[in-house]
Image (spheres, rainbow, N blue to C red):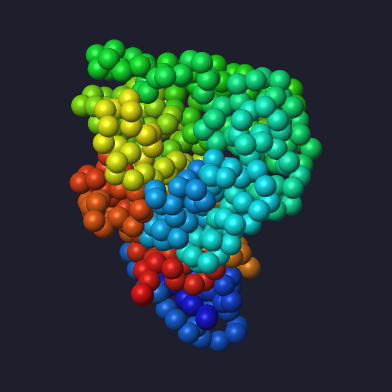
Amino acid sequence: MATVIRGGRLVDPANGVDEITDLYIDKGRIAALGTAPDNGQPDAEIDAGGLVVCPGLIDLNARLREPGEEHKATIASESRAAASAGITTLCVPPDTEPVVDTQAVVELIHRRADDAGMARVEVLGALTAGLEGERLAEMAALQQAGCVGVSNGLRPVANTEVMRRAMEYASTFGLGVFLHAQDTWLAKDRYMHGGSVSGRLGIGGIPETAETVAVARDLLLLEQTGARGHFSHLSSARAVTMIAEARARGLAVSAGVSAHQLHLTEDDVAGFDSQCHACPPLRTAHDLKGLRAGVQSGVIQAICSAHQPHEKDAKLDPFALTEPGISALETLLPLALALHHEEGMGLSELLAALTIKPATIIGVERGSFGVGAVADICIFDPDARWVLEEDAMLSQGRNTPFLGQPLRGRVMHTLLGGRTVYPWVD
């Protein structure tokens, strides 16, 4: 079906477009901007007056829990939540059950995503077999199955020699290495940022050096091996500075930050709020400021959800016994937009961190409105104010500290390959 989106503010950072105009779609692809193509009148029309029209959001760090933990969430439930949030591409880490270290698991995830039909799901293959950090995974087979990169999930590779060989092996296939920067020993049996709040609460604290020591090691290994590295979710201002210095030296390294790290700090844990038990941990106000500055300067290229849905029981124990993670798909856009509303960051620059920059990191041809590009589209009202209500959430996981909180910026339509996937008609 040929469709026209009329009168919206088209923001396409990839092509430097930011203007009020029409967007034409035909056969699931962008047909024209501004002037109607020559093949006749569209069959459908979407009025986008007063709204922003941008490429569909690309989330580089979202756990969908399937296969293996369907009691927490499924690909179907979470891709539906993603569609309601304007997210058209989800990149999932390999720490499922079973681990994504065989072609069969990759094919299963792709098949379940295709069956759901609500979002594209890209897969990161395992860096080491079983994510055990001892033997290298079969990266050639994983790439052949369609993996866009490799990772050890939230299980850092403690053995530096194994990590060096893994980076070398990944680089031979042109696969990016997605890194969770956390020193195993400095973080062991600790649950929040190590500082004044953890001391007052009597909770074992993870020091900033747990991240920065790991970043330093992995940057040196990336430099030695020539591999491409992406730090999936930084949490400290010092790590941002280290990445900036490495990029200035010409290292092929990129970084992401989870949207909630741009809003929450250790102070939000002060009441033993298990909804703020996150991985990596929430750090200081100084770190939050540094992370926001990193996005604005371009040192941090991607804003992700770091989505980790849980069943209700996972957050009911005393803080240290609860499972870390936040259900974050449905708050990704409004939390990111705060940098535009509160910090004055240009809308195009901000949306680049949610569209074309993540697309480039995983090497997919999405995130733009070039003629012929796939018509994955997010249409949102940047000024709409709303409150996140538990009963209205579409994610199977309702574990978020933003319940009942006012948010600004709401998705009105999501198109996947030119087909409307939100709002939907059941």
Q: Position of residue 14 (x, y in %)?
A: 57, 53
Left or right side of 74 for 277: left
**Percent x, y for residue 245?**
59, 22
Question: With respect to residue 395, does 279 lie above or below?
Answer: above
Count of numbered labels shown in the rendering: 0
**Does residue 286 appear in this view?**
no
Q: Nearer the viewer, residue 345 or 101?
A: 101
Q: Residue at x 26, y 28 (%)?
A: 318
Taking the view exactly as shown, the residue that stands out farthest to the bottom is 40
- Quarter of the image for residue 158 reads top right
Q: Residue 410: give x, y in percent of width and height.
A: 32, 56
Quadrant of residue 266 in the image?
Answer: top left
- In this view of the protein, can residue 155 be seen by the observer? yes
Identify the residue at image location x=37%, y=17%. Answer: 205
Which quadrant is the C terminus positioned in? bottom left
Q: Which residue is at a point 35% across and 64% down the rendered structure image?
A: 412
Question: Left or right of 357: which side holds 422?
Answer: left
Front in this rendered view, residue 309 or 102: 102
Of residues 247 and 98, the one nearer the viewer is 98
Determine whether, in the image, residue 70 is placed left or right of residue 268. right
Q: Position of residue 165 (x, y in %)?
A: 74, 27
Q: Residue at image x 31%, y 53%?
A: 409
Asked if 290 appears above or below 359 in the picture, the reply is above
